[in-house]
């Protein structure tokens, strides 16, 4: 995974460089970009390639246009936004393949950049169609992948082109993601603590199984905690429960015990009668859980315990919120985790869309060691899976 060539290993001057980025950014109804995190994350690679005299061809997807042209998913707003960030012209291609695009690329001088139109306007992108990949590859001489967020997908622009254009190398963002996630799993400084949240055990089974072999402690929060508590025979009222996963939760708890891994579950909860932002909240413990209430956040005792574990940790991986942080009344647990990580001197790695959103919402993103740009990709990496977009890159 980590023995791949990097952009610093190749000479790009005067070369047409096909660089896969992840510009899949949220847009409002006026098609203004509401969060440019992903574009900014690619800037070091883009700037480096332009400074080295590459003729830069950027490719990305946006949304799910289902293999046909849809102006609502055009990457034109990303080109305009990138132009503002770079302070230099960014051309917008009329398409992502074809003679007209080749002609537009032929007009590029060294150190100039063009953004191709959405690669998902063609079904060949998500099908990883060899002919579509070949048409993309025909546009360039070298391949750079800086789109970690799509590295778990074997698509034409992430995997197919990398097989055809050699060398195929990692951009700075891709390198950084693999370095932090890879080192955390391969050689963590201890104590190594994993904080796993989110709604369902089923979404995180593989991650928990992998982490049980590597961590010293796992702190569980979010809706999935109630399946684990049920497995311990604790009543959880009307809380989210995967009844068909209770036996599996028992197995995971037994695995943790046999491996000497501390497996911490919430001791108290913020509960409400309904899943609503304005639902009246109350606190309860594991012994007095009201039968007609659901847990929507971890309680103050649990926050205190989890803070202590984070304070003494040297490496922390966090994936998934502690509660329904979109509702202010039930956001305290998730924000408390973010605050504890910000106050700690540990190596903190935040992966997964909701955890990242919570850290950003708390205004603590600058205090984290590494915030992963790939929700699904970081999850699959933590599960121990090989990522097709990484495997396809050229070995050193």
Image (spheres, helix red, strand yellow):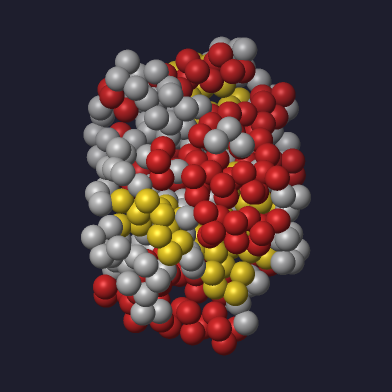
In the image, 174: left or right of 290? Answer: right
The correct choice, above or below, for 130 with respect to 18 in the image is below
User: How many numbered tags mark residues here?
Assistant: 0
Nearest to the observer: residue 64 or residue 304: 304
The x, y position of residue 231, in whole percent, is 37, 78
Nearest to the observer: residue 283 or residue 393: 283
Does any portion of residue 103 appear in the rendered image? no
The correct choice, above or below, for 197 with respect to 82 in the image is below
Residue under the point 65% across and 62% down: 309
Residue under the point 60% across and 56% down: 304
In this view, the residue farthest toward the bottom is 258
In the image, 273: left or right of 322? Answer: left
The x, y position of residue 61, in whole percent, is 40, 36
Residue under the point 43% across and 64% down: 285
Quarter holding the N terminus is bottom right
In the image, 123: left or right of 99? Answer: left
The correct choice, above or below, for 128 with respect to 228 in the image is above
Does any portion of residue 295 appear in the rendered image? yes
Quarter holding the C terminus is bottom right
The x, y position of residue 354, in whole percent, is 45, 45
The x, y position of residue 195, in whole percent, is 55, 59
Q: Quadrant of residue 49?
A: top right
Residue under the point 56% across and 14% down: 84
């Amino acid at each position: 995974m980590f023995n791949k060539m990097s952009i610093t290993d190749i000479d790009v001057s005067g070369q047409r460089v096909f660089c896969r980025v992840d510009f899949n950014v949220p847009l409002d109804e006026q098609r203004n970009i509401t969060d440019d995190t992903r574009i900014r994350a690619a800037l070091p690679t883009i700037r480096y390639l332009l400074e080295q005299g590459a003729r830069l061809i950027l490719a990305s997807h946006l949304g799910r246009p289902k293999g046909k042209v849809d102006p609502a998913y055009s990457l034109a707003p990303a080109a305009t936004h990138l132009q503002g960030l770079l302070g230099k012209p960014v051309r917008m291609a009329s398409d992502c393949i074809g003679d007209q695009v080749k002609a537009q690329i032929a007009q590029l001088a060294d150190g100039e950049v063009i953004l191709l139109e959405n690669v998902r306007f063609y079904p060949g992108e998500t099908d990883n169609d060899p002919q579509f990949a070949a048409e993309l590859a025909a546009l360039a001489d070298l391949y750079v992948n800086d789109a970690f967020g799509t590295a778990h997908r074997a698509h034409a622009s992430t995997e197919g082109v990398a097989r055809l254009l050699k060398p195929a190398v990692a951009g700075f963002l891709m390198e950084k993601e693999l370095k932090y996630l890879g080192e955390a799993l391969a050689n963590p400084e201890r104590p190594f603590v994993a904080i796993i949240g989110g709604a369902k055990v089923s979404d995180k089974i593989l991650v928990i199984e992998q982490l049980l072999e590597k961590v010293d402690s796992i702190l569980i929060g979010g809706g999935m905690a109630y399946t684990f508590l049920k497995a311990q025979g604790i009543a959880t009222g009307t809380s989210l429960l995967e009844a068909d996963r209770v036996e599996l939760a028992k197995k995971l708890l037994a695995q943790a015990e046999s491996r000497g891994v501390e497996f911490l579950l919430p001791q108290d909860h913020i509960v409400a009668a309904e899943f609503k932002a304005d639902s009246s909240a109350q606190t309860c413990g594991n012994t007095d859980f009201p039968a007609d209430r659901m847990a929507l956040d971890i309680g103050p005792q649990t926050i205190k315990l989890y803070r202590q574990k984070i304070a003494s940790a040297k490496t922390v991986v966090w994936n998934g919120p502690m509660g329904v942080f979109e509702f202010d009344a039930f956001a305290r647990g998730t924000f408390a985790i973010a605050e504890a990580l910000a106050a700690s001197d540990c190596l903190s790695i935040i992966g997964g869309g909701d955890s990242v959103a919570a850290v950003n919402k708390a205004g603590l993103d600058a205090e984290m060691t590494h915030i992963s740009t790939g929700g699904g990709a970081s999850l699959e990496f933590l599960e121990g899976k090989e990522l097709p977009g990484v495997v396809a890159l050229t070995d050193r």
